[in-house]
Structures are given as C-alpha cells and as structure tokens.
Image (tube, helix red, strand yellow):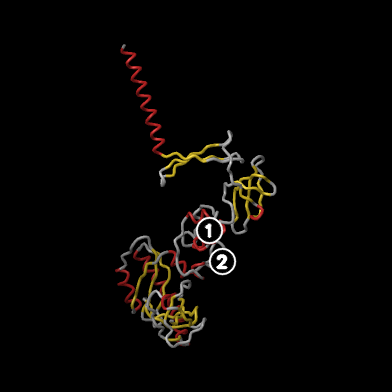
Amino acid sequence: MKTIVGIQFKGGGRVYYFDPLNFDFKRGDYAIVETVRGLELGYVSIGNRMVEDDQLEHELKPVIRIATERDLKQEKKNNEQAKNSFEIFKKYVKEFGLAMKPLYCEYTIDSSKVIFYYSADDRIDFRDLLKVLAPEFKIRVELRQIGTREAARVIGGVGSCGRELCCKTHLSNFDFVTMKMAKEQGMALNTNKISGICDKLMCCIAYEHELYQELKKELPNVGQMVKTPSCECCKVVSVDYIKKLVRTSENASGALSIHKAEDVELIHFDAKLKDNAQVVASIDEEDNIVIEETIPSFHDLETKVLTKDKKTNNKSKNRHHQKKKQGITNDKTKN
C-alpha cells in the first residue's frame, strides 16, 4: 500500500498525484511541489489516501512542503506581476509580427522563472523575441506552445450549456471526440453548434457517449417500425434518449405523436415481401457483398443477399450471349 495526495494547479481540471511523505494533507490545503515548470503552489483536491502499489503507473514525486502564509502572499504577488508581464509580452509579439496568439503567463513560486503560453498553427522561431524578453525581466524566460483545448482549460469560460467548462472543472484528460459520437446522440451535425470555445468538438460528447450507448439498448432506432397505444404500426422519426421519449409518424395520415419508451413496442417483421414494397440496394464493401433489402409496407420485410461474384458472372453470361448472337447475324449478312 502507498499513501498519495491529489493536487491541482492553476489550470484546474487534471489531478496530479504526489507522495505526501510525512505531511497530513486534507482537501483545501495548499502544497509546494516540484514540476517540470519548477517550484509551484498546488491546491490539494484529494487528501491523503491509501492505494495499492499496482495502481501507480510510475514513481511519485515527493511533496516539498505544506504551503505557508508567506507562500500564499507570494503567489498573489506573482499573479499581479504576471498581468503586467503579459502585456509586455503581447506588445513585443506585435512588434515582431509573429504569427502567434498570446494566451497567458505565470511565475514559479520562487519568482525564478516566467513562462509565457501561446497558440499557433505552425512552429514559431522566437529566438529574436527571447533576446528582448530576457533583459526585460532579468530572470529565466520560457515560451511554450499549447493547443486550444489546453488554453481553454487554463483560461476557463462558460460553455453553450451555460455552465463552467468541463475541462476546467472535472475532466482530467482530453478524450478523442468524433462526429459519429454526436450523430449517435441525435445531435445536429453542425460543427458550429457542437464545438466548444476551443473550436474543437465538445468534450461532453465523449464524456456522455457511454451513457447514450446504454440508453440506446432500451430504445428503438430511428426508422424502425413500432406499435404504440394510438397506432398499430408507425415509423420512428426521432428519439430523445435522456427523456426516454419516442416520436413516431403514422403511415396513413403522417401525423406525428410522442410516446414514452415503455409505451412503445418494437415490431419484428417475418412475413414475405408484398407487391407494394420498395427495394433498396446497397454495397457492403467490407464483406464484399451486395445487399438488396426491402423497405416494408408496414406489414412485411424480406432481405436478399447476392455476392458480387455471382452478379459479375451474370453480367459475363449476358455479354457472351450478346456476342454469340451478333456473330450469327454477321454470318447471315455475309451469306
């Protein structure tokens, strides 16, 4: 068993774990730790707790000490100084005409280093800029390029839902988000509507994806035929997975109605295809087959499968028959 403590930094969101040594940390305390950026003041979001050794992915860095009142005052002073330093940084970026977007800056707790963060589409040669900044601040200066997601996490903001950004409050990692996830959740496939302030697909889409996968097992899919209290056979036109509501359209009148999930019964078609059914063909490239499936006339359904090879053979036979027929015609003409 190993004792750990969870600490968050200015950006919030992700929790980093350290070895508390002999210090007894509780949630709400502050600690001084060493990171890749240098000595930093961190907020204790998870107090001391025991975990199994196999749960640790790597060796934990030790906490330096519990933050004192002096450390907290120094942090406040650094934050005020960072505002002025950031304005100077933006001024020089504009003067040099660099294609970068300044985001924010921060000082280490001992004021031995200032770090400027920026975003850019490409790599930036800022060596000339550093030559000006170093004598300006008279301490070690670092420039770090970060993505727009990381910038949103640190700067913070309010999402389209009206709540504080997920990456700022509780998300510890940036998961991969796809348009397919948004489609499966019934969202409008408009990137402007489903993108966050970072111009990337909203993290909540991936965060909620597993929940929607579970809810979909309990509800019919759009396009399926169902039985409702008001209709013996209707088509599902939309599904509200969160409220568990199903909107259907009647075959005859086309009238729309909304039903609770428990009032909807999925219809399974076993009868043979009738004359008024519509046939739609599609190609499954992965399995190398051509599928001819029917759109039922609300009463029946039948599926036929033909291999591509079989269809190709039929075409070859037709061409051979046409050539043979053409040859007979030519012989008659010569005679």
Question: Which residue in the structure is indicated by mark 2?
Answer: 163
Q: Is residue 300 above or below residue 108?
A: above
Comparing 141 with 59, the one in front is 59
Tell whether 13 sits left or right of 276. left
Residue 183 image offset from top left, x and y in percent? 51, 53
- Identity of the amino acid at label 1? Gln
Q: Is residue 196 above or below residue 289?
A: below
Question: Which residue in the structure is indicated by mark 1?
Answer: 213
The answer to whether marks 1 and 2 mark residues whose Cβ atoms lie closer than 8 Å is no
**Which of the two discs, 1 and 2, sits closer to the camera?**
1
- Identity of the amino acid at label 2? Arg
Asked whether the viewer can see residue 256, the reply is: yes
At horizontal 44% and vertical 61% (from top left) the residue drawn is: 176
Q: Residues within 10 Å of mark 2 (few under 14, many from 20)?
A: few
Quadrant of the frame with the C terminus: top left
Tell me the element at label 1: helix
Q: Residues within 10 Å of mark 1 (few under 14, many from 20)?
A: some
Residue 143 image offset from top left, x and y in percent? 35, 71
